[in-house]
């Protein structure tokens, strides 16, 4: 603080400090400014609780998965290319896996190594190993005991499960012995 | 205290004159290079030779403007105002000279290395490791001289401008050191110790805070000195200074992740980035208010005085940019604006409006005083102001239009599914007019700046260099009565409250989920504010706690460091801890020797300035580029290549899309396959070669930062690079009848491009096939 006498400015009010000739007043903070200040802090707390603590709103990738699902429900015929692309889409595969873990492990085992149902991790497929054939098997079921999941889960979820199953192909988890025919991807 | 003991102090103003001259010169150079880059985007033939293609010009422009133009400007302002606010001459003229000449040498080194493609490829931190070390050294010289001034000061209390200088100096040191950490693999080549998500987080923690603590806080300090000086009006509010200062330094450091919204960055970090950015709005506007409201009662001067016009407009642009920033940090807004020209417009509102105008105002006021004369031509300064303002408006508006147009086109989907504009080029060609308009705006601004340079030179010529003086009553401060010890200051009530609150937050961070801990952090912010209010109230009974610490430079500095470090540690450390385990657990495979070399070509050419490698989880992005990117995919990327701007399409899944022959033709002449493209041609890549005998060293460096290459792979680098190059050469020969040498840069680059989004399949279970490859290489 300087030794100069402090004065009162007719606009800025009482001068509290002087540094190198620069006078400093001490006006009250504008109310609207304080409102934005505390308002933003409050908003931040609520936003955090809403999104992070209670996860009420979707994260970007969750919102995306839902949007994709909605789009897939509508889409036309299911092609090999679609399913392969889907099997490279991590969020899609993750939700497919979640469904698999809930619905399919009873018959296929938690590692898809096969129980009543066949091993899904080898190269051999009873009803065909092409992506669209796998989708069809899941969707329509088989006479031997595989239920028709398509009508139950919806087309989108079925595609996701198919995408997950595609990622299991040829990972060769030790389990039930191979059944069906060896499936080789057609060469381009 | 005896009145007779008066001594006269002569300030070192030479150093201010030098820094101003350097700032003006590099300002012109930096903006000229910027105009050139703008021209290149509108008119591709402006990419002249490999050295001046857009990917190398753009880092040259950003570095020149940030570190050469604004850097020299803040040094000028800091030296001038600090000496006067502390009533002390610069302690060491020699250190001052080392600082000045060292900094200019660094700038020259940058101007040489960047066009040569010597780069770490991290935005605004491109300079390679030897220059990084020089920067750290020179910065410490500056810091040493500055804190020496504080130590020898003849004014007990520190004015708010100095708080901002202190915060800037310590924070920039931390940011620069952490972000530049790299393992050298050659004299001019290094790899960041951080990779993938981790590197993205560190880089944008740095990048955002380079804006905060290099372009903003020092200039706020300058504002606090020069606006009241020039207008001769009292500063509006001391308590506003306290609140917005502490809020700004504490909150700013957290906001970095807003550059990475909707990417593969963990959600908690994205949300933190967003909410802290929103909380920044009011503290930033606190600075604007204190600047503008200081001008109360000086409005009539504003009409006649060009200097005050520059300051008032500069502060207003600051307010505009700091409103737009939080807006852009909202995840939904970011989904539209990210990767587009809107961000370019935003940063130029800050750089041209805030930094450029504050610099102009300061120079117009200082130069006449530093040369004991009057401003040569006031009319010219007024003209500069009007051309400059018009230039900024043209620039910003054209970038808004370009950014929003392209953002909307990218996301336009047809009702039956699929993209409305599936061809990327179509969305680029739409912007042509805006790109020319931007160039006009930028050029106008540059013309105004050149006018200023002429005016300042004429002013200096009309006078003679003079150094300011002052009289101080005694040398050194009188001994203080009732001096509070550090201990007393630390156990004061405001500190107690904040320590308790921080401990709660830290405890929660270790015991419960991340969620609750970060929630507490926002609580901390609120608590800190309460403390500030408290300390103000205390003022009524004796000096307030804050006014005591204003007189205690060392204590104040420590508090600033703590405030800044909290955010940095909370955000960065978790990812640094998680990094190595992510690398160990991944099923991803590191790049082959040739792909690594190709990636280095990609870095050196600055492809990341136009291409992102980060597909966000939106249906329209997936339709255009493929599945959303995962953290896994970039785990071996040291440094990460997510990019920040899509002048060209995303390349994260480029590999399976185009053939080697297509890339060959496209790289030599992009317009052969893509009519209207503004991508620079790269014919030199087909001629320049790579020395594969050096690849081994590079792989060793990568191994050092954690990429799991086996010893065998490292040893076989040269052989394997040659082998893979031959397969590409053969493919090119067969499919396109092209002859190209296997060791050219282009072949390596094609190998890298083919690898993107197309990693080799790892056979987890059948280990015979996995071990087959290395053994064949071994026998050769």
Image (tube, grey):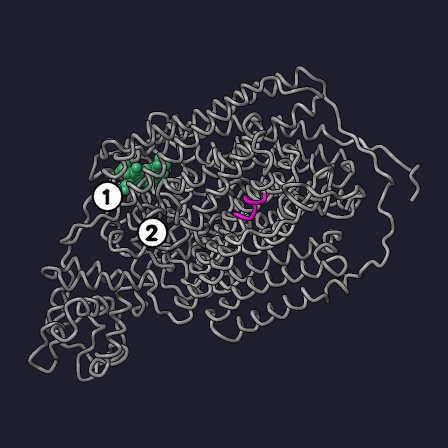
Task: Name the subunit of mark 1.
Answer: B
Task: Name the subunit of mark 2.
Answer: B
Give the image quarter of residue B676: top left
Q: Residues within 10 Å of mark 1 (few under 14, many from 20)?
A: some
**Residue B65 x/y as whole percent:** 52, 34
* Magenta range: B285-290
- Choose mark 1 or mark 2, whichever is in front: 2
Above or below A78: residue B379: above
Picture mark count: 2
**Residue B150 x/y as whole percent:** 75, 45
Identify which residue, B367 or A137, lies in the foreground.
B367
Q: Secondary structure at mark 2?
A: helix
Tell me if B541 is positioned left or right of B186 in this view.
right
**Residue A159 x/y as whole percent:** 18, 66
Tell me if B412 is positioned left or right of B333 in this view.
left
Residue at point 49% right, 66% down? B518
Is any atom of residue B109 visible in this view?
no
Q: Secondary structure at mark 1?
A: loop
Give the image quarter of residue A180: bottom left
Above or below A16: residue B484: below
Identify which residue, A111 or B640, lies in the foreground.
B640
Residue at point 64% right, 68% down? B497
**Residue B467 x/y as whole percent:** 75, 27
Q: Which residue is mark 1?
A: B659
Q: Which residue is mark 2?
A: B335
Q: Residues within 10 Å of mark 2 (few under 14, many from 20)?
A: many
Give the image quarter of residue B135: top right
Is any atom of residue B696 visible in this view?
yes
């Amino acid at each position: 603080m300087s030794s100069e006498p402090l004065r009162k400015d007719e606009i800025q009010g009482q001068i509290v400090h002087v540094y190198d000739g620069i006078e400093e007043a001490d006006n009250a903070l504008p109310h609207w400014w304080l409102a934005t200040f505390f308002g933003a802090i409050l908003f931040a707390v609520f936003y955090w609780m809403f999104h992070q603590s209670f996860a009420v709103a979707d994260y970007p990738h969750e919102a995306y998965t839902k949007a994709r699902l909605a789009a897939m429900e509508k889409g036309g015929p299911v092609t090999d290319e679609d399913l392969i692309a889907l099997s490279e889409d991590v969020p899609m595969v993750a939700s497919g896996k979640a469904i698999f873990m809930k619905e399919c492990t009873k018959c296929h085992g938690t590692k898809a190594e096969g129980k009543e149902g066949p091993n899904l991790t080898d190269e051999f497929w009873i009803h065909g190993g092409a992506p669209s054939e796998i989708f069809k098997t899941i969707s329509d079921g088989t006479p031997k005991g595989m239920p028709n999941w398509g009508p139950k889960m919806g087309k989108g979820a079925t595609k996701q499960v198919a995408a997950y199953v595609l990622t299991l192909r040829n990972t060769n988890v030790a389990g039930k012995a191979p059944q069906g025919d060896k499936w080789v991807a057609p060469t381009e | 205290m005896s009145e007779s003991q008066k001594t006269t102090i002569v300030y070192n103003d030479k150093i201010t004159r030098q820094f101003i001259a350097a700032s003006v010169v590099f300002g012109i150079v930096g903006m000229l290079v910027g105009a050139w880059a703008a021209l290149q985007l509108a008119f591709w033939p402006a990419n002249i030779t490999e050295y001046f293609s857009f990917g190398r010009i753009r880092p040259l422009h950003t570095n020149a403007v940030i570190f050469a133009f604004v850097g020299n400007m803040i040094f000028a302002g800091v030296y001038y105002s600090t000496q006067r606010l502390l009533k002390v001459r610069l302690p060491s003229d020699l250190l001052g000279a080392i600082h000045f000449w060292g900094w200019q040498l660094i700038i020259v080194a940058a101007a040489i290395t960047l066009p040569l493609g010597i780069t770490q490829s991290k935005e605004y931190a491109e300079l390679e490791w030897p220059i990084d070390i020089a920067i750290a050294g020179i910065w410490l010289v500056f810091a040493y001289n500055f804190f020496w001034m504080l130590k020898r000061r003849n004014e007990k209390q520190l004015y708010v401008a100095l708080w901002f200088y202190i915060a800037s100096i310590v924070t920039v040191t931390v940011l620069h050191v952490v972000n530049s950490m790299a393992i050298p693999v050659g004299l001019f080549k290094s790899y960041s110790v951080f990779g993938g998500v981790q590197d993205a987080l560190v880089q944008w923690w740095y990048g955002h805070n380079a804006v905060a603590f290099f372009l903003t806080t020092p200039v706020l300090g300058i504002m606090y000195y020069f606006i009241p000086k020039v207008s001769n009006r009292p500063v509006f509010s001391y308590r506003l200074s306290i609140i917005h200062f502490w809020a700004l330094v504490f909150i700013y450091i957290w906001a970095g992740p807003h550059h990475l919204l909707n990417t593969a960055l963990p959600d908690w970090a994205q949300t933190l980035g967003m909410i802290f950015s929103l909380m920044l709005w009011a503290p930033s506007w606190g600075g604007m208010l204190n600047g503008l409201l200081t001008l109360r009662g000086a409005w009539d001067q504003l009409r006649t005085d060009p200097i005050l016009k520059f300051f008032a407009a500069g502060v207003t642009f600051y307010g505009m940019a700091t409103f737009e920033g939080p807006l852009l940090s909202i995840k939904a807004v970011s989904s539209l604006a990210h990767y587009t020209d809107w961000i370019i417009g935003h940063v130029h509102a800050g750089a041209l409006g805030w930094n450029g105008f504050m610099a102009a105002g300061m120079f117009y006021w200082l130069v006449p005083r530093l040369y004991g004369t009057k401003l040569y031509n006031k009319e010219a300064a007024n003209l500069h102001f009007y051309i400059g303002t018009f230039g900024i408006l043209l620039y910003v508006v054209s970038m808004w239009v370009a950014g929003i147009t392209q953002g909307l086109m990218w996301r336009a989907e047809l009702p039956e599914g699929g993209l409305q504009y599936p061809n990327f080029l179509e969305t680029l060609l739409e912007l042509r007019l805006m790109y020319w308009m931007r160039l006009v705006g930028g050029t106008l601004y540059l013309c105004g700046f050149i006018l200023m340079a002429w005016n300042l030179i004429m002013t200096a010529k009309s006078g003679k260099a003079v150094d300011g003086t002052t009289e101080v009553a005694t040398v050194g401060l009188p001994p203080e009565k009732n001096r509070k010890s550090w201990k007393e200051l630390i156990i004061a009530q405001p500190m107690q409250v904040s320590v308790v609150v921080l401990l709660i937050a830290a405890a929660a961070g270790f015991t419960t989920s991340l969620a609750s801990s970060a929630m507490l952090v926002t609580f901390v912010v609120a608590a800190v504010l309460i403390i500030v209010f408290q300390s103000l109230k205390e003022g009524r009974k004796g000096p307030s706690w804050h006014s005591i610490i204003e007189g205690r430079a060392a204590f104040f500095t420590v508090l600033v460091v703590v405030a800044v470090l909290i955010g940095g540690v909370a955000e960065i450390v978790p990812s640094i801890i998680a990094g190595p385990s992510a690398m160990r657990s991944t099923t991803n495979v590191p790049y082959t020797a040739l792909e690594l070399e190709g990636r280095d070509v990609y870095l050196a050419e600055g492809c990341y300035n136009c291409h992102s490698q980060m597909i966000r989880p939106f249906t329209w992005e997936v339709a255009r580029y493929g599945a959303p990117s995962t953290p896994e995919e970039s785990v071996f990327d040291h440094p990460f290549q997510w990019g920040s701007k899509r002048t060209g399409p995303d390349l994260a899944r480029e590999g399976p899309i185009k053939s080697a022959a297509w890339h060959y033709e496209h790289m030599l002449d992009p317009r052969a396959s893509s009519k209207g493209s503004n991508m620079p041609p790269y014919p030199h890549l087909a001629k320049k070669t790579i020395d594969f005998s050096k690849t081994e060293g590079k792989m060793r460096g990568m191994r050092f930062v954690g990429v799991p290459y086996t010893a065998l792979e490292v040893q076989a680098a040269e052989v394997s690079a040659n082998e893979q190059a031959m397969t590409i050469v053969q493919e090119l020969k067969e499919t396109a009848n092209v002859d190209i040498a296997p060791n050219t840069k282009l072949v390596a680059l094609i190998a890298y491009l083919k690898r993107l989004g197309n990693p080799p399949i790892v056979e987890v279970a059948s280990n015979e096939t996995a071990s087959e490859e290395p053994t064949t290489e071994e026998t050769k």
